[in-house]
Image (spheres, grey):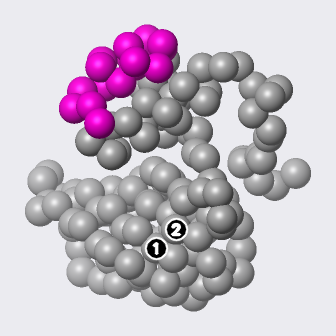
Amino acid sequence: MNSEYLIVHKSVLPDCYERVVRARELIRTGAVREVSEAARIVGISRSTYYKYKDFIFAPSENTACKKAIFSMLLSHERGVLGRVLNCLSDKGANILTIMQNPPIGERASVIISADITGLTEGIDAIISALLSIGGVERAGLLDVE
Protein backbone atom coordinates (compact mmCIF):
# COMPACT_ATOMS: atom_id res chain seq x y z
CA MET A 1 0.00 0.00 0.00
CA ASN A 2 1.51 3.32 -1.09
CA SER A 3 -0.83 5.76 0.66
CA GLU A 4 -0.31 7.15 4.15
CA TYR A 5 -4.05 7.84 4.38
CA LEU A 6 -6.89 5.45 5.14
CA ILE A 7 -10.64 5.84 5.18
CA VAL A 8 -11.87 4.15 8.34
CA HIS A 9 -15.37 3.92 9.77
CA LYS A 10 -15.49 5.88 13.02
CA SER A 11 -17.11 2.99 14.90
CA VAL A 12 -13.74 1.18 15.06
CA LEU A 13 -11.76 4.21 16.24
CA PRO A 14 -11.31 5.57 19.76
CA ASP A 15 -13.90 8.18 20.73
CA CYS A 16 -11.27 10.91 21.08
CA TYR A 17 -10.77 11.14 17.29
CA GLU A 18 -14.31 12.25 16.64
CA ARG A 19 -14.08 14.64 19.59
CA VAL A 20 -11.00 16.27 18.04
CA VAL A 21 -12.98 16.86 14.83
CA ARG A 22 -15.85 18.36 16.84
CA ALA A 23 -13.45 20.61 18.76
CA ARG A 24 -11.84 21.84 15.54
CA GLU A 25 -15.31 22.58 14.16
CA LEU A 26 -16.21 24.62 17.26
CA ILE A 27 -13.07 26.70 16.76
CA ARG A 28 -13.57 27.03 12.98
CA THR A 29 -17.16 28.26 13.32
CA GLY A 30 -16.31 30.72 16.09
CA ALA A 31 -18.55 28.99 18.64
CA VAL A 32 -15.54 29.10 20.97
CA ARG A 33 -12.43 31.26 20.92
CA GLU A 34 -9.84 29.05 22.55
CA VAL A 35 -8.65 25.48 22.20
CA SER A 36 -8.98 24.90 25.93
CA GLU A 37 -12.68 25.83 25.79
CA ALA A 38 -13.35 23.59 22.78
CA ALA A 39 -11.48 20.70 24.41
CA ARG A 40 -13.46 21.10 27.62
CA ILE A 41 -16.81 21.17 25.76
CA VAL A 42 -16.11 17.99 23.79
CA GLY A 43 -14.45 16.21 26.71
CA ILE A 44 -10.80 15.85 25.69
CA SER A 45 -7.55 17.30 26.94
CA ARG A 46 -5.78 20.10 25.08
CA SER A 47 -2.83 17.76 24.52
CA THR A 48 -5.13 15.22 22.82
CA TYR A 49 -6.46 17.98 20.57
CA TYR A 50 -2.96 19.15 19.60
CA LYS A 51 -1.71 15.60 19.12
CA TYR A 52 -4.36 14.69 16.54
CA LYS A 53 -5.70 17.96 15.07
CA ASP A 54 -3.51 17.87 11.96
CA PHE A 55 -4.13 14.20 11.22
CA ILE A 56 -7.89 13.66 11.49
CA PHE A 57 -10.26 14.99 8.85
CA ALA A 58 -13.96 14.52 8.29
CA PRO A 59 -15.24 14.58 4.71
CA SER A 60 -18.26 16.78 4.14
CA GLU A 61 -21.61 15.00 3.91
CA ASN A 62 -22.24 15.48 0.19
CA THR A 63 -18.75 15.32 -1.26
CA ALA A 64 -15.52 13.50 -0.61
CA CYS A 65 -12.38 15.63 -0.49
CA LYS A 66 -13.04 18.46 -2.91
CA LYS A 67 -10.79 21.03 -1.24
CA ALA A 68 -7.43 20.75 0.47
CA ILE A 69 -5.18 23.12 2.36
CA PHE A 70 -1.45 22.62 1.97
CA SER A 71 1.19 24.16 4.24
CA MET A 72 4.74 24.69 3.02
CA LEU A 73 8.00 26.23 4.07
CA LEU A 74 9.81 27.61 1.03
CA SER A 75 13.32 28.95 0.70
CA HIS A 76 13.45 32.59 -0.35
CA GLU A 77 14.67 32.22 -3.90
CA ARG A 78 13.24 33.19 -7.24
CA GLY A 79 10.73 30.83 -8.86
CA VAL A 80 10.04 28.42 -5.98
CA LEU A 81 6.41 29.44 -5.52
CA GLY A 82 5.88 29.35 -9.28
CA ARG A 83 7.22 25.78 -9.44
CA VAL A 84 4.91 24.79 -6.57
CA LEU A 85 1.89 26.28 -8.35
CA ASN A 86 2.85 24.58 -11.63
CA CYS A 87 3.24 21.25 -9.84
CA LEU A 88 -0.20 21.50 -8.25
CA SER A 89 -1.73 22.52 -11.57
CA ASP A 90 0.00 19.67 -13.42
CA LYS A 91 -1.47 17.22 -10.89
CA GLY A 92 -5.00 18.51 -11.55
CA ALA A 93 -5.45 20.88 -8.60
CA ASN A 94 -7.09 24.26 -9.07
CA ILE A 95 -5.59 26.94 -6.80
CA LEU A 96 -8.19 28.82 -4.76
CA THR A 97 -6.09 30.97 -2.40
CA ILE A 98 -2.43 31.60 -1.60
CA MET A 99 -1.26 33.11 1.67
CA GLN A 100 2.45 33.82 1.91
CA ASN A 101 4.22 35.37 4.85
CA PRO A 102 7.24 37.62 4.32
CA PRO A 103 10.49 35.67 4.38
CA ILE A 104 12.23 35.42 7.73
CA GLY A 105 15.67 33.86 7.84
CA GLU A 106 15.54 33.18 4.08
CA ARG A 107 12.36 31.07 4.44
CA ALA A 108 8.69 31.90 3.90
CA SER A 109 5.66 29.96 5.04
CA VAL A 110 2.93 29.49 2.45
CA ILE A 111 -0.60 28.17 2.80
CA ILE A 112 -2.37 27.14 -0.41
CA SER A 113 -6.00 26.08 -0.64
CA ALA A 114 -6.92 24.14 -3.74
CA ASP A 115 -9.87 22.44 -5.36
CA ILE A 116 -8.67 18.85 -5.66
CA THR A 117 -11.67 17.40 -7.46
CA GLY A 118 -9.63 16.82 -10.60
CA LEU A 119 -6.48 15.33 -9.04
CA THR A 120 -4.73 12.82 -11.24
CA GLU A 121 -2.84 11.31 -8.26
CA GLY A 122 -3.41 10.79 -4.55
CA ILE A 123 -2.59 13.32 -1.84
CA ASP A 124 0.55 11.38 -0.83
CA ALA A 125 1.90 11.64 -4.37
CA ILE A 126 1.13 15.36 -4.47
CA ILE A 127 3.01 16.00 -1.23
CA SER A 128 5.95 13.88 -2.44
CA ALA A 129 6.02 15.87 -5.68
CA LEU A 130 5.99 19.14 -3.73
CA LEU A 131 8.85 17.95 -1.52
CA SER A 132 10.90 17.05 -4.59
CA ILE A 133 10.83 20.66 -5.82
CA GLY A 134 14.06 22.53 -5.17
CA GLY A 135 13.44 25.16 -2.50
CA VAL A 136 10.53 23.37 -0.82
CA GLU A 137 11.82 22.59 2.66
CA ARG A 138 8.57 21.27 4.13
CA ALA A 139 5.16 20.40 2.72
CA GLY A 140 2.12 18.91 4.36
CA LEU A 141 -1.63 18.67 4.36
CA LEU A 142 -3.45 20.87 6.89
CA ASP A 143 -7.06 19.97 6.10
CA VAL A 144 -9.36 18.47 3.51
CA GLU A 145 -13.05 18.89 2.88
Location of mark 1 (residue): 114
- The amino acid at mark 2 is Lys
On the image, the x and y values in percent for residue 1 come to: 88, 51
Vertical comparison of 57 with 125: above or below:
above
The answer to which quarter of the image holds residue 134 is: bottom left
- 63 vs 94, left or right, is right
Kindly state the secondary structure of the residue where label 1 is placed.
strand
- 18 vs 81, left or right, is right
Residue at the (72%, 48%) spot, across then down:
5
Vertical comparison of 43 with 20: above or below:
above
- 45 vs 125, left or right, is left
Q: Do the residues labelled 1 and 2 touch (CB within 8 Å)?
A: yes
Q: Nearer the viewer, residue 78 or 17?
A: 17
The C terminus: image quadrant: bottom right
Q: How crowded is mark 1: few (under 14 residues within 10 Å), some or many (20 or more)?
A: many
The residue stretch that appears in magenta: 31-46
Q: Residues within 10 Å of mark 2 (few under 14, many from 20)?
A: some
Residue at the (22%, 66%) spot, across then down:
100
Location of mark 2 (residue): 67
Residue at the (49%, 84%) spot, across then down:
94
Distance (Cα) linking label 1 and label 2: 6 Å
